[in-house]
Amino acid sequence: MRTHHAWRLCLHTRRPRFQVPASAVASWQQEFPSGCDRPPAVERLPGTAYLLGMSETYDSLERQPLHHRIHYHYDVTRCDVIGDVHGCYDELAELFVRLGHEDLLAPDVPSAPPGRMPRVVFVGDIVDRGNRIVEALSLVHRLCVRGHALTVLGNHDDRFVRWLRGRPVEIQHGLGETVEQFEAIEPALRERWRDELLEFMGLLPWSVHLDGGRLIVAHAAWHAELHNERSGDRLRAYTMYGPTTGQQTPEGYPERIDWAPHFLGPELVVFGHQVYDAPYWHDYAIGIDTGCVFGGALTALRYPSMEIVSVPSRGARWLRRGGRADYRG
Ligand code: MN
């Protein structure tokens, strides 16, 4: 049976004077993935441009040009950016209370009223390794869909999406925890949620650009030249995994380049992915993954006040050298 999924890709801002350049829209249409039944329609409104179309599978979304994975939310001027959650729902809930977002924890939280901006931005890696992955992902999903939060796609989230699609994925680096907890959901509910998650996660951006472009949130890294990067593969690799030397560490991981001290802006980039003992603070780049799932802390950066709010981990669920930790939370 051929199934078709409607997709909508957008470049948008709620700033009424911002017009998406017609040339950008035209290049989207030209570059658009083969496998589409017909060229996507364009809806170009003040402040927003949408490409509307149908594709046979989600696969074609992976070959989409870069602009579809950069999301612009220029009018978000105030938000709390939260580091890698990795299924640490308890600390996330505590952090929300500390930040004054306890209202967002209600399962029946209403959608944000028109014009209200998202308050919370996640750096991605919601899943894997932790003990309450389903609750964490469910919260993030609900808040994003209802307009209270934004998230970029982390490398762990990306692998989970591949697993959801039935692609071959090695069950390692804590994906086993996600799969186990996902499969424990009551089947009818699980299958419904799987479809919703594919719809939601299949279109998550690799970077979001906020506050008139002054703030960029990406999972692992950003680079000035990415604004003009034409290759979706390169954009995806850089934002999701960060720069590497091409060499391997003795443990067999790609050797990472410490890009943050050398990034010269002008935007502020807030990222996760690389675990630090404390926020990794530079002039134009701040790493906020303080390793909650490894026994560190879950950290938020309040923007624009630049205040750090951290909740200590309730215990390591995962060992830094790999493997499940003996957690009794
Ligand atoms: Mn991570």
Image (cartoon, rainbow, N blue to C red):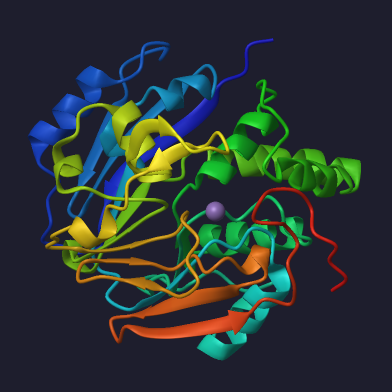
What percent of the width, then of the height, locates residue 9? 36, 38
Q: Quadrant of the N terminus?
A: top right
In the image, residue 194 sits, relative to residue 97, either above or below, namely: above
Q: Report the label total.
A: 0
Q: Residue at position x 42%, y 11% from top?
A: 35
What percent of the width, then of the height, locates residue 122? 48, 63
**Of 311 and 187, the residue lying toward us:** 311
In the image, residue 191 sits, relative to residue 131, either above or below, namely: above
In the image, residue 127 sits, relative to residue 312, either above or below, namely: above
What percent of the width, then of the height, locates residue 20? 15, 46
Image-based side of 91 in relation to 23, left or right: right
**Of 62 and 74, the residue lying toward us:** 62
The quadrant in which residue 123 appears is: bottom left
Task: Note whether residue 143 is visible.
Answer: yes
Image-based side of 185 in relation to 230, left or right: right
The quadrant in which residue 121 appears is: bottom left
Q: Residue at position x 69%, y 60% from top?
A: 87
Q: Report the residue that reaches farthest toward the front.
A: 250
Task: Note whether residue 107 is visible.
Answer: no
In the image, residue 251 sits, relative to residue 140, either above or below, namely: above
What percent of the width, then of the height, locates residue 111? 54, 69
Q: Residue at position x 42%, y 84% from top?
A: 308
Q: Residue at position x 32%, y 41% from top?
A: 243
**Of 87 and 188, the residue lying toward us:** 87
**Of 33 and 244, the residue lying toward us:** 244
Q: Quadrant of the C terminus?
A: bottom right
